[in-house]
Image (cartoon, helix red, strand yellow):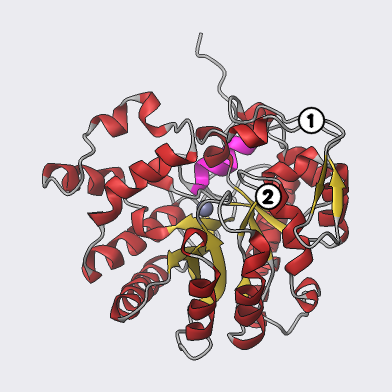
Amino acid sequence: MVPQKTPKIPYTLPKAEMHTHISLALSNEAFIRRVKKKRTDLSLDFLVDRETRYYPDLTKFHGTYESMRHMTNTQQELADTVQGYLERIAREGAIYAEISNSYREGSDFEWQMDAISAGIEAARHNTGIETRIVVTTLRNHGAAKAEAAAQFLSTYKNPYVTGFGLVGDEGVNQFMEFSKALNIAWHEAGLGISPHVAEQHLHNAVDFLEVIPQDALKNHHRDMRRLRIGHGVLIHLSSDLMKEFADKQICMEICLSANKRIGLPEATKIHQIGEKITSQNGNRSITIDRPLTNYYESVSNHPIKSFIDAGIPVCLGSDNPLLMNTNIGKEYSLINQAGVTNMSDHLQLTRNAILYANVDPLTRSRLLSHIDTYESQVKSSDTLPLETTLGYKKAFMD
Ligand SMILES: [Zn+2]
């Protein structure tokens, strides 16, 4: 008998990729070519040994990331990586993506942004997928560098750069130190903001609530900027935080594979029920009243359904597709395993993504109409559409 697998989500369902670090989003084929040319010290085993793409902690993950750093060294390689990834996810049904790349001082930043923009335009020409860029700064480099990056972006002009993010080790440099950088990004550079928060350390979520620009919570129709957080998964430990995120309608970019494949630090594993966490400025305090679910061992324990049930807007991201052995189609299918099984919830993930995307009002309404079209097609017919809303067709339905 054929074993029952978790049902896949149809490739035709409109999807959005809201969290991916693009420079290493290489296909397996491109990775193999780089290994053969000795562009990395990783071997082909990386693709086939199951354990190689699981990371006991963030240090191990960053080590692997470093081993790959020189795999996209030139403008052409970066543009090809961007185009290849976007076209791949468009075939999986993606209508929109926000991709991130880190800020660099000097001329490297400009050629990288030009390459990424060229990749975006080529992919849009070939598939119709719409894409924007989130420029990130590395938390490990400190607040002054983050402020300099945000300041630079206030004069930098690139129509695809619409967001600003904060990445790196959440255990170093207090989140509140980045308040000024986030405010410069929002107020002066006119960018949406989406920092990594509470992926590995819960106290960041408490500090985050203290530093967000208040008008970033309003989601004006005519304002293209939005506030989201990268990950946020650890807020499931506290009803206080869950309520706050629901009340403020803060959108979370959930990355199921990343959560499953990267272990948590000891400091997070030893949190106790009843423990209080206070923000660095002493103004806000939350209580831990829920146990840590072991979503890092099984996606079926992931709290994504509790976020949805609490009314928190959630969207999906694949984070690091090559390093996590995933893609956005797979991330959508994984939510079935996490207990989110009905189509209206699946579509809501894409709706949330578009409602919280850093795009102009016209693009937002055009993208939302793709979702409405799919939903009405499915409701008015017994069979699923045979092609994606952007017109990609497969010979056989999966
Ligand atoms: Zn990330």
Disc 2 is placed on an element classified as loop
- Name, please, the residue furthest toward the left: 37
Q: Earlier in the sequence, mark 1 or mark 2?
A: 2
Q: Which residue does the numbered mark 2 point to in the structure image? A: 232
Task: Specify start and end residues of the magenta stretch as a single range.
Answer: 328-335
Percent x, y of residue 229: 66, 59
Residue 219 lies left or right of residue 102; in this view the side is right
Q: Which mark is residue 272?
A: 1
Residue 164: name its quadrant. bottom right
Q: Nearer the viewer, residue 43 or 220?
A: 43
In the image, residue 311 sits, relative to residue 269, either above or below, namely: below
Residue 62 lies left or right of residue 345; in this view the side is left
Query: Is there CB contact under 8 Å for labels 1 and 2?
Result: no
Percent x, y of residue 118: 33, 75
Q: CA distance from mark 1 to mark 2?
A: 19 Å
In the image, residue 369 sits, relative to residue 158, either above or below, namely: above
Percent x, y of residue 191: 60, 79
Residue 80 lies left or right of residue 22; in this view the side is left
What residue lies at 20% left-to-right and 45% top-to-bottom? 40
